[in-house]
Image (cartoon, rainbow, N blue to C red):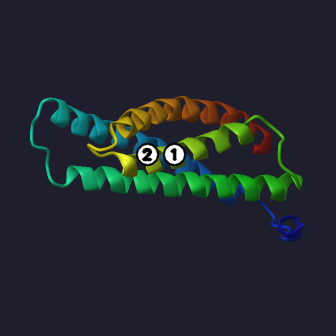
């Protein structure tokens, strides 16, 4: 395998990037929950929202998508490099679930409009499932980290 052929002395640098990316992903999710709640409150109370709020919410969402895709690539590269194959724990399906939910949530956000009332409900539902997905990937990730630590 190409990745195994790299014969890197340690994947510790990769796990550090993953740890920072996961922490930033959770922080981005929190910021999205706050800004999304602000958008929802302004809409339900028929109040004007700051003009910068929606673009900020979209930008943070794009950042979250980028971080989750980075985490996916780190996980695949690290696992293939360390073990030579995938599927050594439940972390892989949990991670793939989070990637799918994040991408679907991002897509559903682009669909939200008065002409598509279903998109907002879908977006909110996916974000709740994403919270559960993040909890699952955090739990399973902790067990994976324990395998790599001496």
* Residue 23 visible in the shown view: no
Q: Position of residue 5 (x, y in %)?
A: 88, 70
Asked whether 142 or 140 is in front, the reply is: 140
Q: Residue furthest left?
A: 47
Which label is found at residue 104?
1
Horizontal side, residue 111 vs residue 1: left or right? left
* Residue 138 visible in the shown view: yes
Identity of the residue drawn at 55% across and 41% down: 101
Identity of the residue drawn at 79% across and 52% down: 79
Q: Position of residue 57 (x, y in %)?
A: 31, 49
Q: Quadrant of the N terminus?
A: bottom right
Is mark 1 in CB contact (under 8 Å) with mark 2?
A: yes
Q: Residue furthest front?
A: 115
Q: Quadrant of residue 148?
A: top right
Asked whether 147 or 112 is in front, the reply is: 112
The answer to whether residue 94 is above or below residue 107 is above
Q: CA distance from mark 1 to mark 2?
A: 6 Å
Horizontal side, residue 77 vs residue 39: left or right? right
Q: Quadrant of residue 38?
A: top left
- Could you say whether the residue bearing mark 1 is in a helix, strand or loop? helix
Q: Position of residue 149 (x, y in %)?
A: 75, 43
Q: Badge 1 local density, few (<14 within 10 Å), some, or many (20+)?
A: some
Q: Position of residue 110 (x, y in %)?
A: 38, 52
Q: Badge 2 local density, few (<14 within 10 Å), some, or many (20+)?
A: some
Which label is found at residue 108?
2
The answer to whether residue 147 is above or below residue 77 is above
Q: Quadrant of the C terminus?
A: top right
Asked whether 150 or 99 is in front, the reply is: 99
């Amino acid at each position: 395998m190409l990745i195994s052929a790299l014969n890197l002395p340690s994947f510790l640098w990769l796990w550090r990037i993953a740890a920072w990316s996961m922490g930033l992903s959770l922080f981005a999710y929190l910021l999205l929950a706050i800004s999304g709640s602000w958008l929802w409150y302004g809409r339900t109370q028929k109040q004007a929202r700051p003009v910068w709020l929606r673009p900020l919410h979209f930008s943070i969402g794009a950042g979250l998508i980028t971080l989750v895709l980075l985490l996916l690539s780190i996980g695949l590269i690290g696992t293939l490099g360390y073990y030579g194959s995938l599927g050594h724990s439940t972390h892989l399906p949990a991670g793939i679930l989070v990637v799918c939910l994040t991408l679907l949530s991002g897509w559903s956000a682009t669909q939200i409009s008065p002409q598509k009332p279903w998109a907002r409900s879908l977006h909110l539902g996916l974000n709740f499932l994403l919270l559960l997905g993040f909890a699952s990937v955090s739990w399973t990730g902790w067990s994976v980290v324990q395998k790599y630590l001496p």
